[in-house]
Image (cartoon, rainbow, N blue to C red):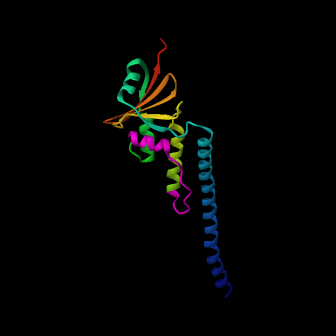
Amino acid sequence: MRRSILIVICLALIPSLLAAYAFGIKHFERKVYNQLRVDQADAIGRSKFSRLEPVLVERQFVQEIEENWVCKGKHSEHLEAAFQSMGVDLNIKNIIWLFHFRMPNFSWADSELNLRHSIIRGFQIALEPISIDGKMYMTPDGCRMVIKPYDTGAIIYTQTQSGVEEAIWHKLDR
């Protein structure tokens, strides 16, 4: 009789302990996730650069930079690696999506979704440029985007057959 009571108590206690353990892990996960959300909200509140406003410009705007400024480097490897890690295609539209991504509320039911949102936020922190005027300049065809981090500099994103190329341009003093 004692043995059967002991077995019943153990069978009742084990799921309770597992549930408490799982709740503790979820609570910690929620705490870390919400800290990322708070950090994002604080960054948006402190800086006028956090939400880039899209502005349509003619192709001549981009051509003037390319003809009169000096290209300091073209690369796309870091963008390719980041977007591949996020499971998102690399194109101008998705770069804009990344720059405007806002973390949704924590999901108690889907840990993988929480992890995905945290990874996306991490890449957003690493890749989002600062814009001196708070704007991203887009050509009407959506294949080129320019962000000006300072008066004499520009980052030009160009959609190519193989993905997106990022080029850094500097204005020469004449």
Camera-side residue of 161 and 152: 152
Q: Is residue 49 toward the left or the right of residue 144 in the image? A: right
Residue at the left extreme of this rendering: 161
The tally of labels here is: 0
Q: Position of residue 123 (x, y in %)?
A: 51, 42
Does 72 appear above or below 137? above
Q: Position of residue 54 (x, y in %)?
A: 45, 38
Residue located at (55% from left, 36% from top): 49
Residue located at (49% from left, 51% from top): 116
Residue located at (47% from left, 21% from top): 170
Q: Quadrant of the N terminus?
A: bottom right
Residue at the top extreme of this rendering: 174
Residue located at (59% from left, 48% from top): 36
Does 25 appear above or below 14? above
Q: Position of residue 70 (x, y in %)?
A: 43, 19
Q: Which residues are magenta?
A: 90-112
Q: Is residue 144 toward the left or the right of residue 99 in the image? A: left
Q: Position of residue 73 (x, y in %)?
A: 43, 24
Q: Is residue 167 toward the left or the right of residue 50 in the image? A: left
Residue at the bottom extreme of this rendering: 1
Asked if the stretch drawn in magenta spans residue 151, the answer is: no
Asked if the stretch drawn in magenta spans residue 94, the answer is: yes
Camera-side residue of 120 and 81: 120
